[in-house]
């Protein structure tokens, strides 16, 4: 059997990682400024993280959600305290897409409405409803088209209100910062207006913090810069530092009933052990503050580079927009300077490193990047 060929792969096999560095099967070391799509939050193979998973696996790897799993409650209490949402409840799943699916479902259960307002250039996942609220027709199959979705421009409150006043919108879903859309910032003013409009028209506000959350922007959630409290928050990626996990943070206004949501693997013992370790490391090593500090340094240094059209982002979620395609720049960074980065579209480099990126590693990246741009 062969693999279903849907990924355009670099001919590099990563076999080892430590902190912000990874090593391939040929022994070549790379500086990781991408974290496997913003997944690596506390660094590759952090000893506390590794020990937590090993210790749990030695006791129990898995049992179902039909019995008590004390690690789930421990994680919920820890996460609530760290992120400032201790009055919300937590539903645990395996991926970001699952988090989106369940968030949309919860909203529709709550108000019995069907239509969703999403935003242009958004990305929320590739499963049934998640891909439908993603603004990319090329990945939406006919079977996904049944959900009623309206895509609006970001930062346009008048356009949102024009849709909400029609009375048939169940939820509005928006990213804390648009990631695949090009590290596009949602203004604080718009988020405040959006929150107020959703309250006015009794529409559920869903904040997709899958890429922009978990400390990446210098706050636990990107929307916290605006001082709002959405009805539902979705998280994944950095929550367990590479162990598959997602979660939905749910406002007290939602009332559960048995069977309303469910999952086989979600919130399993190993995932919870990994996620608890991540929060402990983030607190102990002050990684949210580090993301703010190192991200500000990178943004300031990158402003000095000729050729960059615009620098966008917050903390360690940075987009570098160029006038032309970044394909050559990214390839030279990878194959000549041994630096992993990401892209958004044809002309934007994305930087999403582990939150433990040190100032020295950031300076090292600037040196390597300068070599590429000045050749």
Image (cartoon, rainbow, N blue to C red):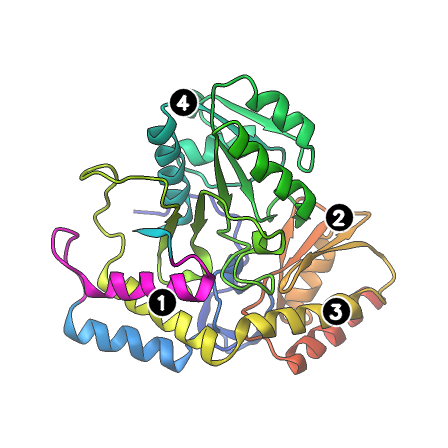
Q: Which mark is residue 24?
A: none
Q: Is residue 135 above or below residue 92?
A: above
Whether residue 223 can be seen here = yes
Q: Is residue 360 above or below residue 83?
A: below
- The image position of residue 225, as x and y in percent, is 62, 56
Q: Which residue is mark 2?
A: 325
Q: Secondary structure at mark 1?
A: helix
Q: Which mark is residue 113?
A: 4
Between circles 4 and 2, the one closer to the viewer is 4
Precedes in sequence: disc 4 or disc 2: 4
Q: Nearer the viewer, residue 89 or 316?
A: 89
Precedes in sequence: disc 3 or disc 2: 2
The tally of labels here is 4
Between the residue at mark 3 and the residue at mark 1, the CA separation in whole angstroms equals: 38 Å
Instruction: Tell me which segment is drawn in magenta.
Output: 61-86
Q: Which residue is mark 1?
A: 78
Precedes in sequence: disc 1 or disc 2: 1
Q: Is residue 313 above or below residue 170?
A: below
Q: Nearer the viewer, residue 311 or 156?
A: 156
Neighbours of disc 1 within 10 Å: few (<14), some (14-19), many (20+): some
Q: Which residue is mark 3?
A: 369
Precedes in sequence: disc 3 or disc 1: 1
Precedes in sequence: disc 4 or disc 3: 4
- The image position of residue 224, as x and y in percent, is 57, 55
Between the residue at mark 3 and the residue at mark 2, the CA separation in whole angstroms equals: 16 Å
């Amino acid at each position: 059997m062969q693999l279903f060929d849907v990924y355009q792969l670099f001919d590099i096999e990563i076999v080892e990682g430590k902190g912000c560095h990874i090593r391939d099967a040929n022994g070549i070391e790379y500086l990781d400024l991408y974290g496997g799509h913003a997944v690596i939050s506390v660094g590759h193979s952090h000893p506390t993280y590794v020990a937590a998973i090993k210790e749990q696996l030695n006791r129990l790897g898995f049992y179902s959600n039909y019995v008590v799993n004390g690690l789930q409650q421990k994680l919920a209490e820890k996460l609530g305290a760290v992120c400032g949402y201790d009055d919300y409840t937590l539903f645990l799943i395996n991926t970001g897409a699952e988090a989106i699916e369940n968030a949309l479902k919860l909203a529709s259960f709550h108000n019995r409405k069907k239509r969703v307002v999403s935003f242009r250039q958004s990305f929320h996942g590739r499963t049934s409803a998640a891909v439908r609220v993603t603004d990319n027709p090329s990945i939406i199959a006919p079977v996904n088209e049944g959900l009623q979705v309206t895509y609006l421009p970001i930062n346009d409150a008048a356009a949102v209100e024009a849709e909400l006043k029609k009375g048939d919108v169940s939820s509005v879903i928006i990213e804390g910062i648009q990631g695949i859309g090009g590290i596009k910032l949602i203004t604080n003013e718009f988020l405040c207006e959006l929150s107020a409009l959703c309250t006015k028209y009794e529409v559920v506000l869903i904040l997709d913090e899958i890429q922009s959350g978990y400390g990446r922007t210098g706050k636990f959630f990107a929307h916290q810069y605006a001082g709002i409290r959405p009805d539902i928050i979705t998280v994944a990626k950095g929550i367990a530092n590479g162990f598959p996990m997602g979660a939905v943070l749910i406002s007290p206004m939602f009332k559960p009933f048995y069977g309303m949501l469910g999952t086989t693997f979600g919130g399993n013992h190993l995932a919870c052990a990994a996620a608890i370790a991540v929060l402990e490391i983030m607190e102990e090593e002050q990684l949210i503050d580090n993301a703010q500090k190192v991200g500000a340094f990178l943004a300031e240094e990158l402003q000095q580079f000729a050729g960059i059209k615009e620098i966008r982002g917050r903390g360690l979620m940075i987009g570098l927009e160029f006038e032309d395609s970044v394909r050559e720049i990214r390839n030279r960074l990878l194959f000549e300077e041994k630096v992993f980065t990401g892209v958004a579209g044809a002309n934007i480099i994305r930087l999403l490193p582990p939150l433990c990126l040190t100032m020295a590693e950031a300076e090292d990246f600037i040196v390597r990047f300068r070599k590429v741009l000045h050749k």
